[in-house]
Amino acid sequence: MLRRLAAIAACVIFLAAVPTGSLYVTTLPTGADVWIDGTYVGRSPLVLSGLATGRHTVGLTKTGWDPLQIEVSVVVAQTTLSSTKLDPAKTSARPLPGSIAIHGIPADATLIDGVAAAVSKDGTIPASAGTHELSVRTPRGRITRTVRVWPQTRTDVVLQPEVEALRPSVVAPAEDYLPRSAIHIVGERIVIRYGGHEVVGRIGATTYRVDGKSADYEAPTMIGPRLYLPLELLTMLSSGPR
């Protein structure tokens, strides 16, 4: 009996010592089905904890997009980032449309590629997948931007008159690119620590501190309960360690 108990204890100790790490999977567009080594684990973005260290196969599928398999390496006691841009499926059928949502300045009229655009009941503007010229007439004048629309994906555009000529206007939900644990919001102050970077900003302010240096981006914005950050900044943060 004592020998059996000793053997069980040894197995428990061995299992506890198996090295594990975590994997954070993001995709553009979001909402892709994710498989790890052939097992379905959910939809992107997602964090998987307790994975054995070493090589794993990540499978990604989404309707209207080419399926993809990639190899990742999980490191002990660390979170490995897998950030993947999917390619539209190469079929003869037209790609599914996406939409554009405009925030900030009230718009008197909106045109996409020179054609008046109708706003849906949910406040978004339907648009075919691809690159478009978005023109918005406001009480302060006309604002024009080049906007990329993805199938079945909403592109959010924030308009701020005092900085329109200087900064990109496309923003995205921070949690689609970064784990919640990397985002800290206290009042209007935002601190993000991820991938070896530290970003400090304030809601409504266009000046950030990025790795200790001043940088200008589109201002952080709260849309409902979600934090939106400039896509350029999110792409830099989610691209991996510097």
Image: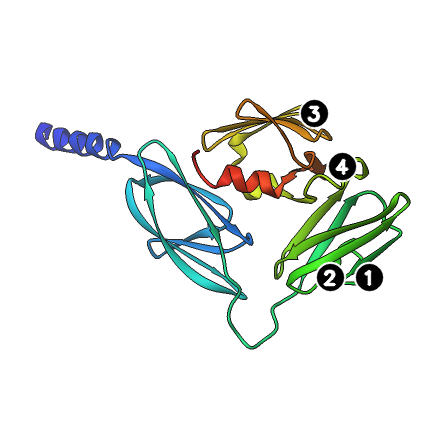
The CA span between labels 3 and 4 is: 20 Å
* Nearer-N-terminus badge (2/3): 2
- Corner quadrant of residue 104: top right
Vertically, is 159 above or below 118? above
The answer to whether residue 65 is left or right of residue 21 is: right
Residue at image coords 24%, 35%:
18
Mark 4 vs mark 1, CA separation in Å: 26 Å
Residue at the right extreme?
A: 139
| Disc assigned to residue 163 | 4
User: Which dot marks residue 118?
Assistant: 1
Q: Which quarter of the rendered picture does the C terminus lie within?
A: top left
Q: Helix or strand or loop: what does disc 2 sit on?
A: strand
Query: In the rendered structure, which amino acid carries the disc numbered 2?
Result: Pro
User: Which numbered dot is residue 126?
Assistant: 2
| Comes first in the chain, label 2 or label 1 | 1
Q: Are marks 4 and 2 in contact (CB under 8 Å)?
A: no
